[in-house]
Amino acid sequence: MKTFKGRIVTPGTTTAEAVVSHGGLNTLASFQKALQFGDKKATCGDQNNKDLFGKQMAGRALCLPQTIGSTTGGLVLYCACAMKRQPACLLFSNPIDSLAAAGSILAGVWLDDINMPVVDNLGQEFLDYVKDGMTIKVLDKGVVEVYDKGELK
C-alpha cells in the first residue's frame, strides 16, 4: 500500500477500483453516452483517450491529471451525478480546473445522497504509481491509499 496526500475539493470517503487516464479527460466526450443514451456504467466514449475509451467510469476511482474540453464540463459532471452515473471519486495529480471543481462542488451542494470525493494536487508520482484495477481508499484530510490488486481484503 502506498499513501498520497492532496487537497480536498469535495469531502468524503470511499473505496473503489481505479481506472487511470494519463491524458486529460474530455468530460463531454467521455460521459455523452451515459447522459444521452442511458449507459448506467458510464462507459467512456472519448475515442481520443486511449487509456479510458470503452472502460466503465461509474463507481470507479477516476485517476487523471486534469479535465479538458469545452465549458460544458462542469455541467456534464453535475448531470452524471444527478443521474447516478458518476465516478466513485475524482483524483487529480494536478490542480483541478475551475469547471470540474464547479461541477463537483455543485453536485455535492445541490444533490442529496451524492458522495463523490474529489482530491487534487496528488502529484505526478501518484499518477505514475496507480494502475487500472488497483483499490483506492479516499480517507479524511485528502489522504488517498492505493493498494495493489489483492492487497486489501
Image (cartoon, rainbow, N blue to C red):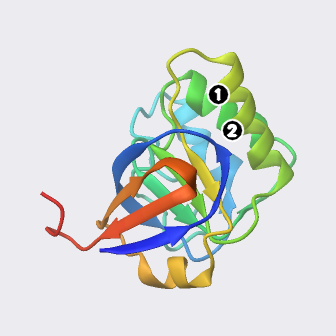
**In which quarter of the view is residue 97 placed?**
bottom right
Does residue 38 appear in the picture of this structure? yes
Residue in the picture at 76% in, 46% down: 101
Residue in the picture at 50% in, 71% down: 4
Please tell me which residue lies in front, 6 or 106: 6
**In which quarter of the view is residue 129 placed?**
bottom left
Above or below, 128 against 26 in this view is: below
Picture coordinates of residue 102, whole percent (x, y): 80, 39
Picture coordinates of residue 118, whole percent (x, y): 60, 48
Q: Which residue is mark 1?
A: 108
How far, Cα to Cα, is label 1 from label 2?
A: 6 Å
Label 1, secondary structure: give it.
helix
Picture coordinates of residue 17, whole percent (x, y): 32, 56
The amino acid marked with disc number 1 is Gly
Q: Callout 2 environment at 10 Å: few (<14), some (14 to 19), or many (20+)? A: many
Q: Which residue is mark 2?
A: 104
Residue in the picture at 56% in, 14% down: 112
Asked if the residue under mark 2 is in contact with the one under mark 1, i.e. CB atoms within 8 Å, the reply is yes
Does residue 76 appear in the picture of this structure? no
Above or below, 83 against 65 in this view is: above
Label 2, secondary structure: give it.
helix
Picture quarter with the C terminus: bottom left
